[in-house]
């Protein structure tokens, strides 16, 4: 497995593979990889001849008071996880390689970025879509793999790929959880032992909501109430949002008739965690 840092090097390698008629799978990441990323790399290596992982903490998707500076970084550890799960190439550019000074072009996907995380993190999806478009143009993969934990991100990328005619299949992969139910996230590393315990409330509240849906509940407000009541029992938890939305439009709904996404964002101490399920 190779690690490269420039666009020129990635393009040269991809060209060699293309000349041999090989297919390319791609996983965009911000590094500090965990089993969730490993599952994407494994799936990509089953479905493609070659697998590229990008590792780039993208400055333009972080708000001014967010964790860009302290976001965990460990390329050595990441390269071990990539190679042991079947990746062939890591592309780990510096910000100066990805953004020329006075970058003037951004990709903004409208409508489905207005609620959920989009409402709470202004500019976040513009940053995500811009960087992912750039990686798609640099790598031109056949398939790109995204985790369902960032359900809105996955929906936004699917929409962007349709709207901008990227010839790339977007593959969504299930959330990977710790044995006790906590969804894996690079940000879990910020949690103290006490907060780590408290964070279990996210999955617990979603499980209660799912049970209620399975029992026939059709009122989205009741589902939200169930989750809010449960989250409120945890003193370290501060709700950022609890939403029940249509799974395609990501718009709030009055009654549950089609496929829905139940999505939450909760601060545990200073750490913002997200989780969701579809029903
Ligand atoms: O999900 C992430 O880690 C990031 O948003 C992504 C897709 C790598 C873009 O920076």
Image (cartoon, rainbow, N blue to C red):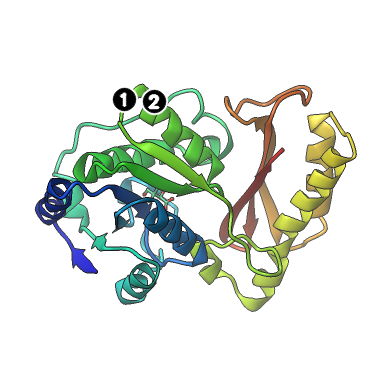
Farthest right residue? 215
What percent of the width, then of the height, locates residue 72?
Answer: 40, 68
One can see residue 241 in this view = no
| Mark 1 lies within 8 Å of ligand 1 (Cβ measured) | no
What percent of the width, then of the height, locates residue 207?
Answer: 78, 52
Question: For the residue labelled by badge 2, is the local secondary structure a helix, a strand or a loop?
Answer: helix
Q: Is residue 24 left or right of residue 228?
A: left
Q: Is residue 227 left or right of residue 43?
A: right
How crowded pointer 2 is (Cα within 10 Å; few <14, some 14-19, many 20+) is rated as few
**Foreground residue, 163 or 221?**
163
> Which residue bears the numbered disc 2?
162
Residue 62's tag is none
Vertical relation: 150 (above or below) 268: above
**Residue drawn at (27%, 63%) of the image:** 88
Q: Is residue 195 left or right of residue 157?
A: right
**Residue drawn at (32%, 25%) of the image:** 164
Vertical relation: 169 (above or below) 200: above
**Foreground residue, 245 or 121?**
245
Vertical relation: 102 (above or below) 164: below
One can see residue 227 in this view = yes
Question: For the residue labelled by badge 1, is the local secondary structure a helix, a strand or a loop?
Answer: loop
**Corner quadrant of residue 214:** top right
* Marks 1 and 2 in Cβ contact (< 8 Å): yes
Q: Quadrant of the C terminus?
A: top right
Report the Cα–Cα distance between label 1 and label 2.
Answer: 5 Å
| Mark 2 lies within 8 Å of ligand 1 (Cβ measured) | no
Residue 165's tag is 1
How crowded pointer 1 is (Cα within 10 Å; few <14, some 14-19, many 20+) is rated as few
What percent of the width, then of the height, locates residue 11?
Answer: 13, 49
């Amino acid at each position: 497995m190779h690690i490269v840092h420039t666009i020129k090097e990635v393009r040269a390698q991809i060209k060699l593979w293309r000349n041999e008629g090989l297919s390319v799978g791609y996983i965009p990441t911000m590094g500090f990889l965990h089993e969730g990323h490993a599952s994407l790399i494994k799936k990509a290596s089953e479905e493609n001849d070659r697998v590229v992982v990008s590792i780039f903490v993208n400055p333009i998707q972080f708000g001014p008071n967010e964790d860009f500076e302290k976001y965990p970084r460990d390329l050595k550890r990441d390269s071990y996880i990539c190679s042991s799960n079947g990746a062939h190439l890591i592309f780990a550019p510096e910000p100066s390689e990805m953004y020329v000074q006075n970058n003037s072009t951004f990709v903004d996907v409208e409508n489905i970025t207005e609620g959920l995380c989009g409402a709470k993190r202004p500019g976040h999806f513009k940053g995500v879509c811009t960087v992912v478009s750039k990686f798609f143009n640099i790598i031109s993969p056949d398939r790109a793999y995204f985790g369902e934990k960032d359900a809105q991100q996955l929906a936004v990328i699917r929409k962007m790929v349709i709207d901008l005619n990227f010839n790339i299949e977007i593959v969504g992969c299930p959330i990977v959880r710790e044995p006790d139910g906590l969804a894996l996230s690079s940000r879990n590393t910020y949690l103290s032992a006490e907060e780590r315990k408290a964070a279990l409330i996210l999955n617990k509240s979603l499980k209660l909501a799912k049970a209620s849906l399975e029992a026939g509940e059709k009122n989205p407000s009741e589902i939200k109430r169930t989750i809010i009541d449960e989250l409120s029992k945890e003193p370290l938890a501060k709700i950022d949002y609890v939403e029940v939305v249509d799974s395609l439009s990501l718009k709030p709904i009055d009654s549950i008739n089609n496929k829905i996404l139940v999505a939450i964002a909760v601060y545990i101490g200073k750490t913002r965690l997200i989780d969701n399920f579809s029903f």
